[in-house]
Amino acid sequence: MLRIGLVMLQGARHAHIAALVAAADVSEIDLEVIELRTPDDLQVTDLDGIVFPGGETTTMRLTGGPEGNGLLPALFEWLRANPGCPVLATCAGAILLADPQDGGEPLIDATVSRNAYGNQADSFQADLRINGLDEPKSASEFPGVFIRAPRYDAVGDDSTITATHDDEVVGIRCGNRMALAFHPELSDDRRFHRWLLETAQSVRT
Ligand code: GLN
């Protein structure tokens, strides 16, 4: 049984659950999704992987920050203590990993700018090129859904590029942390969720 923690602060959480369930089915993996709502939820069980959904970082920092329920600083510390734990972070999740604002080190080697494509009206869909997903369709197209997406300003040496839109980086992997500017859970292509589950499986065994 693979236990994947899902950060329940905001955003497309239920779409991530549906994507994880579908990916687990294809990969023939027994899955339990653990909903992470408070710092205590990180202590309850051994987690094999984390999904960090999008949303609004301003809201997430308020509700999950030190003045809120404290989930974010607890999660960032947990991730620093478990550096090999696979993470799939989308959009706002990727912003928070790059800029945790908890006084500690960033959790991915990249810098991003929020809302850098413009406002809600500038949300868009586009075919992406993806790299390095370990299955036959790798290095092919992926349907990218961008919603008030961030842009990568700089990608450090510890990161590899996993998705591009035209020539622009829209996804990176830093160790076992995949940080995407788009929303794979809102398309029906499950390859990033399968990557998370299969990486989690291989880390555990
Ligand atoms: N615009 C959001 C932010 O800056 C991120 C959008 C998203 O997660 N879809 O926090």
Image: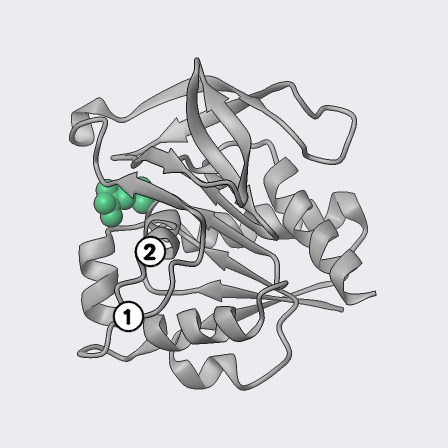
Residue at coordinates 78% horizontally, 46% vertically from top-left? 27
* Residue ranking furthest to the top: 166
Residue 148 % position (x, y): 25, 35
**Residue closer to the observer: 165 or 2:** 165
Q: Amino acid at mark 1?
A: Asp
Helix, strand or loop at disc 1? Answer: loop
Image-based side of 118 in relation to 155, left or right: left
Mark 1 and mark 2: Cα distance apart in space:
10 Å
The residue positioned 26% from the left and 64% from the top of the image is 101
Q: Dots 1 and 2: beta carbons under 8 Å? A: no
| Image position of 172 with respect to 106: above or below | above
- Residue placed under numbered mark 2 in the picture: 96
> Quick check: which quadrant has ligand 1?
top left
Mark 1 nearby-residue class (10 Å; few <14, some 14–19, many ≥20): some
In-front residue for pair 79/37: 79
Q: Where is residue 86 shown, x and y percent of the image? A: 61, 57
Q: Position of residue 1 (x, y in %)?
A: 76, 69
Q: Secondary structure at mark 2?
A: helix
The residue carrying pointer 2 sits among few (fewer than 14), some (14 to 19) or many (20 or more) residues within 10 Å by Cα, namely many
User: Given the image, on which type of amino acid does mark 2 rest?
Assistant: Leu
Q: Quadrant of the C terminus?
A: bottom right
Name the N-terminal-most of marks 1 and 2: 2
Residue at point 39%, 55% (across, down): 97
Residue at image coords 67%, 44%: 195
**Left or right of 66 on screen, residue 174:** right
Residue 50, given in percent of the width and then of the height, sits at: 54, 61
In the image, residue 183 sits, relative to residue 32, either above or below, namely: above
Q: Nearer the viewer, mark 1 or mark 2?
A: 1
In the picture of the structure, the residue carrying the numbered disc 1 is: 102
